[in-house]
Image (cartoon, helix red, strand yellow):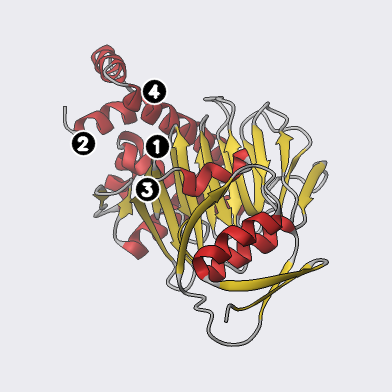
Amino acid sequence: MDQKSINDVIGSVLSGEASEQDKEVLENWISQSEYNREQFNLLKALWQHTRIEVNRTNSEELFDKTLKKIESTGTGSYGPGHSIGYPNKRKQYVGLKIAVAAVVLLVTAAIFFYQRGQNYFGSSETVMVEQSNPAGRKSRIFLPDGSVVWLNSKSSISYPESFSEHERKVRLTGEAFFEVTKDSLRPFNIRSGDIKTTVLGTSFNIKAHENAESLLVAVKSGRVAVNLQDSPSENVILGPNEMAIYTKDSHLLSKTVFDDPMNHFAWTDGILYFKNTPLKEVFSSLEDWYNVSVQVEGQGIDLDHIYTGSFKKNETLNNVLEAIKFIEKFDFQLKGKKVVITKNE
């Protein structure tokens, strides 16, 4: 069965208009692979979230706003390689009910229009929990639903003391690795800078420092949807060993494959890992990892030279610098919380 046909079947089931034959077709399709099952569960959760948002506002007003959003772009998207267009309002209405691609677009548009100007976590009376790590500290956090977060240094996370009945929301600044408890009825949403990540139950890493040139979402297991806050119809669906990259200057969201999971996940095991990393980024990582300031003095040190190496858990800063300087040919001095790097003559 081609993608368009199964989209029509899923759309009819989610909207409650499916025949018994449609239901049987969907059950057979889901049973074919774990990928199909995860894809359907994610779409089902997004659809349920849309129905909640529609019930909270005027449906005609929401429909008109959604239509204008679609008309302004010409197309909507559902993952890489899939696009849809709507020539008139009646066809758009039908499309929203029967096409899964339109379901995804309506979900993101509904959330965008409803939440714009609203508090991300809902009521101002919501009791919030905020946790942050300074440079040199990492922590493990247990969320109200049993999900686990490894929060990296110079990072912070905020979330409600208890999640709502319909969804789970957190806000992240910096870097964190998530192991999300599966709950098909309550999507798990993470807002980090200009992107939002939606999952059901999976493990993945988000790197979203405020001063960084790009934001990264790397998936270890399960499936994740990533979309832009100010343009929710732009989204990518990620599977294991896939990564979303949002470039701030160009406002582009792209999808790629990574072949070395250690690059993204080693830090959660306390391993300091570098692979083809510019020396200036190595020094920056050491600052965050050990809560020190690295100062490069004099000329002759190529900060763009790439370095590869890894260090086991709890390795001392002195030992790390000794190993790096053997390759990079520099001298260093430790002065309290300051590291002075000079050229090795």
In primary-sequence order, the first of circles 4 and 1 is 4
Q: Examine the rendered structure and indicate whether residue 17 appears above or below residue 58.
A: above
| Label disc, if present, on residue 146 of the rendered structure | none
Q: Is residue 119 left or right of residue 192?
A: right
> What is the spatial separation of the Cα atoms under label 4 and label 3, in whole angstroms?
39 Å
Q: Which amino acid does label 1 sit on?
A: Pro
> What is the spatial separation of the Cα atoms under label 2 and label 1, in whole angstroms?
24 Å
Q: Which of marks 4 and 2 is in front?
A: 2
Q: Where residue 277 sits in the image (x, y, percent)?
A: 47, 62
Q: Which amino acid does label 3 sit on?
A: Phe
Q: Which amino acid does label 4 sit on?
A: Gly
> What is the spatial separation of the Cα atoms under label 4 and label 2, in whole angstroms?
18 Å
In primary-sequence order, the first of circles 2 and 3 is 2
Residue at image point 83% right, 41% down: 127
Q: Where residue 299 sits in the image (x, y, percent)?
A: 57, 87
Q: How many marks?
A: 4
Residue at image point 80% right, 43% down: 129
In primary-sequence order, the first of circles 4 and 2 is 2
> What is the spatial separation of the Cα atoms under label 2 and label 3, in whole angstroms?
29 Å
Q: Nearer the viewer, mark 4 or mark 3?
A: 3
Q: In this view, does 164 lie to the left or right of 84?
A: right
Q: Where residue 287 sits in the image (x, y, percent)?
A: 69, 63
Q: Which of marks 4 and 1 is in front?
A: 1
| Label disc, if present, on residue 4 of the rendered structure | 2
- Label 4 belongs to which residue? 16
| Label disc, if present, on residue 258 of the rendered structure | 3
In primary-sequence order, the first of circles 2 and 1 is 2
Residue at image point 80% right, 66% down: 337
- Label 1 belongs to which residue? 240
Q: Residues within 10 Å of mark 4 (few under 14, many from 20)?
A: few
- Residue 109 can be seen, yes or no: no
